[in-house]
Amino acid sequence: MDDAPPNPWLSWRYVESNLTELSDQLTIHTTLTLEAVAIALAIAFPLAVLARNVRWLTRPILGITGVLYTVPSLALFALLAPFTGIGRTTVLIGLVVYALLVLVRNIIAGLEGVDRDVVDAARGLGYSRLRLLWGVEIPNALPSIVAGLRIATVTTVALVTVGVVVGYGGLGQLMFRGFQSNYRAQIATSVILCLVLALVLDLAIVMAARAAMPWARRRRAA
């Protein structure tokens, strides 16, 4: 006869009993993701513009971001920890590093994919390089940029959990404790929250992109 206590994968009692902790870790997970993607985008955009304008820099920029992307996350956090300490800063730096490659590649692809006839027409109208970039090239490159932003965001949501190795993994903290104690409800609830967070952020980006690109909606309707 099995006298082991019940250990279900889904338990509403667990959620009710640990609502505060779940909320706190979800907040940490969300803010880490948003901050990392925002910082990565702020770094990736000028790098991509520089790579597009100065052709010989394209390969070095993509090469460096590519090499950084291939470093295993556990190893990267371990390498950063002696310099940046244990906690939020180390995780944030690692997340930014991993988001860079996707964003840089997509921004470059988007800018290079702008119709040359449209660019030439804008130049013929006397557009300066800065006005051409912001008024013509970026709006036309937005679909590619948004695609990269979606990938980087969803990937970052997953990578935040690895931050548990340096004591700051958001929902990963709960997952790790659940694995240690074989508490299935804790593991499953953390995983579900990660999936929901990734879905919500992805949908938010899609909605924002639709609002920023009304011409795309009109084109599809036509």
Image: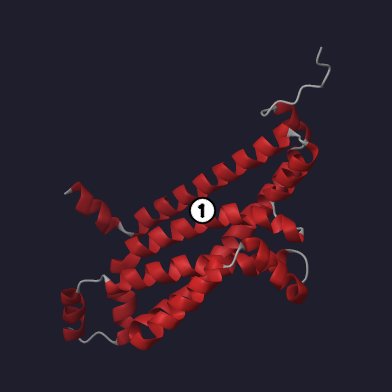
Q: Position of residue 150 (x, y in %)?
A: 45, 56
Please give left or right for residue 199 compared with residue 49 in the image.
right
Observer able to see residue 187: yes
Query: At x 75% / y 61%, what residue is drawn?
Result: 166
Q: Nearer the viewer, residue 95 or 117?
A: 95
Please give left or right for residue 115 compared with residue 66 in the image.
left
Query: At x 32% / y 59%, what residue is drawn?
Result: 213
Query: At x 73% / y 58%, what residue is drawn?
Result: 165
Q: Nearer the viewer, residue 63 or 124?
A: 63
The quadrant where residue 47 appears: bottom left
* Dot 1 alpha-carbon crowd within 10 angstroms: few under 14, some 14 to 19, many 20 or more: many
Q: Look at the picture and state if 137 lies above or below 130.
A: above
Question: How has the structure been colored for display?
Answer: secondary structure
Judged from this view, the residue extending furthest toward the right is 3
Q: Look at the picture and state if 147 lies above or below 130.
A: above
Q: Position of residue 52 (x, y in %)?
A: 34, 81
Please give left or right for residue 167 compared with residue 92 in the image.
right
The quadrant where residue 97 appears: bottom right
Observer able to see residue 38: no
Q: Look at the picture and state if 206 lies above or below 89.
A: above
User: Label 1 sits on what residue type?
Assistant: Val
Which quadrant is home to the N terminus?
A: top right
**Mark 1: secondary structure:** helix
Q: Position of residue 6 (x, y in %)?
A: 77, 22
Judged from this view, the residue extending furthest toward the front is 1
Query: At x 20% / y 54%, what residue is drawn?
Result: 219
- What residue would you read off at disc 1? 154
Please give left or right for residue 200 compared with residue 117 in the image.
right
User: How many numbered callouts?
Assistant: 1
